[in-house]
Amino acid sequence: MRYSLFFLKFREYLQIILLWVIAVFFFALTAYSMAGYFYFRVHGVTLLDFLRLQLFGVLFIGFFIGTILFLLQEFVYPYLFRSYGILFTAVLRSLLFFITCFVGLFIVIQLNNTNFLINHNIFVLQIENLWIFCFMFYCLTVHVLITLFLVFRRRMGEKYFGSILTGHYLVPVVEYRIFMFLDMYSSTAAAEEAGHYTYSLLLQECFSDLSDLLPKYNAEVYQYVGDEAVLTWKISQGFDRAKCIAIYEDFCTKIDNKKGFYQCKYGIVPKFKASVNEGLVTVAEVGRIKTEIAYHGIVLSTAARVRDLCSSFNTDFLITSSFYEQLPVKSMKNFKIADTIFLRGKKKAVTIFMRAD
């Protein structure tokens, strides 16, 4: 399924709010258990009555803090902390959030002074200053945990992170997948011309541009190997294979639109070639010291060798017959047979298709 970037952002926004609602609800339960004997039993307030009274407060506070965190994450953090590591990023974000908490604390104290919290039965914040500071420290701790969770998930990739977290591939699983091998032309010459440091900055910029397109086309990054990126899609019913072609076209268009920037900053305008293949692979979580999810099968080696033939056929984009035969009819018309050849190490001939234009 192809999700819009807005949908993905909105889903993340709801997830953050849900996490904060759960956190505030837990704090409310803690407040009830600690103050129940001295306050609630005297006034005959049951747990059910307490939860009913605090429902609005829990939802409001969770929604408010979650919204603030999401806005900071989308419009502030990326510009301030993009060049820092995960741990340092979490510390800096927490400091900024701590400042925000002080602003919220000031508002809460003012509401306490006007009896707003008492009139609306929001006991979770209807407390003395010591409890308010405890709540603020609690929010700071929750913020650190949520921040680490979000940063790790974004750095590792949502699907990859979820698979590692749940242990989905601890036992090898057979899946039907599409793979795209995306490689930069003349990488060795480019590295020598620009210097390895500048060349590394160039690759960072290129793969950053590629990353911006991944949510739009629901693509996963299997791995980055030198100047190569390997993308993959898990096939499901009704999967649109045309988007595997579209992401390459959009990426090349994006690079072309920024060619002035690349030439000015790096002295090189990168150009990429790609190949696409599909089929059954075995997916397994491997390694104990360093764990990663690995794909095993001839699908990958075939795609890699087909990619190396782009220069031989004077084209930037090649696909195998396995992928071509599953394309929509309108997309098939854009390709023609390039050749049927025996790839190195393969016993069966592979039919390769190239663009018709």
Image: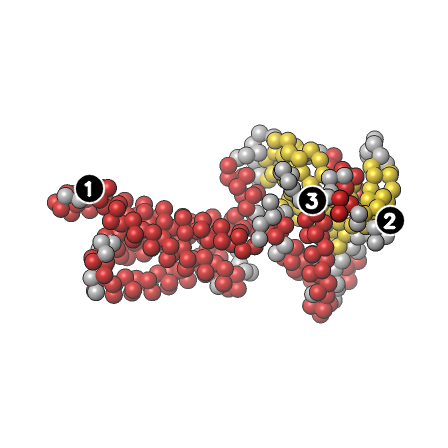
**Distance CA(mark 2)–CA(mark 1):** 78 Å
Residue at the disc numbered 3: 241
> Cβ–Cβ below 8 Å for labels 2 and 1?
no
The residue type indicated by label 3 comes to Arg
Q: Which quadrant would residue 352 be assigned to in this image?
A: top right
Of 42 and 240, which appears nearest the observer? 240
Image quadrant in which the C terminus is located: bottom right
Residue at the disc numbered 2: 312
Specify the color scheme.
secondary structure
Of 77 and 188, which appears nearest the observer? 77
Residue occupying the point 81% across, 50% down: 355
**Distance CA(mark 1)–CA(mark 3):** 57 Å
Residue occupying the far front of the picture: 330
Residue occupying the point 86% across, 52% down: 314
- The mark closer to the camera, 3 or 2, is 3
Can residue 246 be seen here? The reply is: yes
From the top left corner, tell me how far across and down residue 164 is, in percent: 54, 39
Q: What secondary structure is found at the residue carrying circle 3?
A: loop
Of 278 and 7, which appears nearest the observer? 7
Q: Is residue 67 left or right of residue 9?
A: left
